Image (cartoon, grey):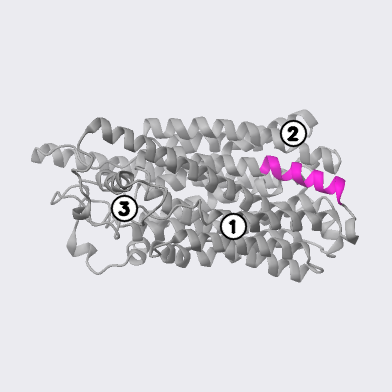
Amino acid sequence: MSLFPRSSTDQLLGDIETYPNVDERIAPASIDRHVLCDSEEQKQVERRLLQKLDLRVFFLVFVYALKHVDSGNVAAARLQGLEEDLHMTGQQFNTLISILHIGSMPMQIPSNILLNNLRKPSIYLSCGIFSWGIFSVWTGAATSFRTALLSRFLLGVTEAAYYPGVVLMLSRWYKRHELASRLVYFTCGVAASRVIGPIIASGIFATVDGTLGCAGWRWLFFIEGAVTCVVAGISLNLIPDFPATPASWLTKEEQILAQQRMTDDMCCIVNDPLKNAHRSGFAEALTDWTVWWLAVALAFLTAMLTFENFFPTLVATMGYGTTTSLLLCAPPWILGAATSLLVMRHSDATRERFWHTTIPVSMGVAGFAIAILSMNTAVRYLSLFFMAQSSVSYIISLTWLSNSIPESSSKRAVAIAFVNSFAEFGDIGGSYLWVTSWGPSYSDSYLFCIFMALISVTMLWVYHIHLIQLNKSGEMKERALGLPAGFRYIT
């Protein structure tokens, strides 16, 4: 018996049939399965298909890194006089951090619903990329706190479409056991932004500070925003659409196989017409208790991860100057990216999510504890390496969510956007955990992060047990009815 009722997933096997709505755009009957009748030929086509997809994933990761550079450069700008030039006081800088998420949260669900119904989502996402580049430039031109606040709010609005949209898009191209290995690169993208962003910032501060009468932190926003606008033009040809949309970069065989793979991956899922008839993806997602459960769990997890937004500040507590502090930000994130690759690949190989989330979170908790116990420079720097290991946990959790919604793509679109946007409550609240008066030790901040981590892991453990029970229930029904093995949830 499951811990809680779940209308869409408590039944694994009832009237067994292939689920007809893996992708509302793709009618399984239209897929010519005889085109690729030779298994060796199909393997070669699949290999070429995945290679082409992976190249586009790398571009998506590059854009994701730019997104984090554009949204996170305010932390570096703080070290170069942003607060003083905009006459900011009290917790106004924390508000500047949190307003980004207030702009992003309400836009993610409607954005994903719209994207799910577009024939050419690449155009939509490219326009979003160009828009956030413009608002990044505007932040550099701000002359007051209010102007900067408005530009950051609009930056959040325009960035909202990208990540949940990309996760949805990739879930329509990759099988469930392939998805985490691709999404791990987005963790690497975040790590790359944490490495490259401070290095670029230190270079800009050292070379163009004062040029044309503009402070270095303004040039930081101008240059990085302009680069994003250029990349937006390139993205029109490199962001993939959905498998059913004709694509010049795919052969006919590759496009047929792309659709067939998704149909095969979701076979043997229960189709209950009484429950699914006339229900929108929005209603299906928001009446599923597990979607809400994961949303709350990831909100606590995100609150724990807010240390990332203040990483340059935490490094600066060791007493180094601006340039040195920015350069010292890089090594912890380089190590974090390397271990993230190993963790996510192992998670896909073993088809396990809970422990691959819990162990990185535990590493972060160890880092917080070390930072609380000592103000020694070497020890404090070591703690940052432990903290950087935890960033992969969010990507694994969101992948787990996508894996656990085998129903219609419209439900998956809403669920991904809802959970990702709800989790930003953690970013909003967590931004106020790092008040200046708590520095330089930030012991209280670290204690709050440990508490958030414990709540999140406990909730994910409950979800883990729930899915195990569903799998056992399905296995028992199969044995009783003498049926072949069917769909199983990744736990």
Q: Residue at x 65, y 38 (%)?
A: 368
Task: Identify the image quadrant of the C terminus.
Answer: top left
Residue 232: mark: 1
Is residue 445 depicted above or below 92 in this figure? above
Residue 4: mark: 3
Crowding around mark 2 (Cα neighbors within 10 Å: few <14, some 14 to 19, many 20+) is many
Three-letter code for the amino acid on which mark 2 is drawn: Arg
Marks 2 and 1 close (CB-CB < 8 Å): no
Give how far across and how far down residue 118 sits, in percent: 40, 64
Residue 380: mark: 2
Q: Along the polypeptide, which appears first: circle 1 or circle 3? A: 3
**Disc number lying in front (2 or 3):** 2
Tell me if I can see residue 43 in this picture: yes
- Give whichever of 242, 382 is nearer the camera: 242
Q: CA distance from mark 1 to mark 3?
A: 44 Å
Give how far across and how far down residue 179 sits, in percent: 41, 42
Q: CA distance from mark 2 to mark 1?
A: 39 Å
Q: Mark 1: which secondary structure?
A: helix
**Disc number lying in front (1 or 3):** 1
Three-letter code for the amino acid on which mark 1 is drawn: Ala
Indicate yes or no whether the magenta region holds residue 199: yes
Range of magenta residues? 194-208
Q: Residue at x 63, y 47 (%)?
A: 448
Please identify the dominant SS of the magenta region.
helix
Q: CA distance from mark 2 to mark 3?
A: 43 Å
Crowding around mark 1 (Cα neighbors within 10 Å: few <14, some 14 to 19, many 20+) is many
Three-letter code for the amino acid on which mark 3 is drawn: Phe
- Give whichever of 72, 25 is nearer the camera: 25
**Residue furthest left in the image:** 481
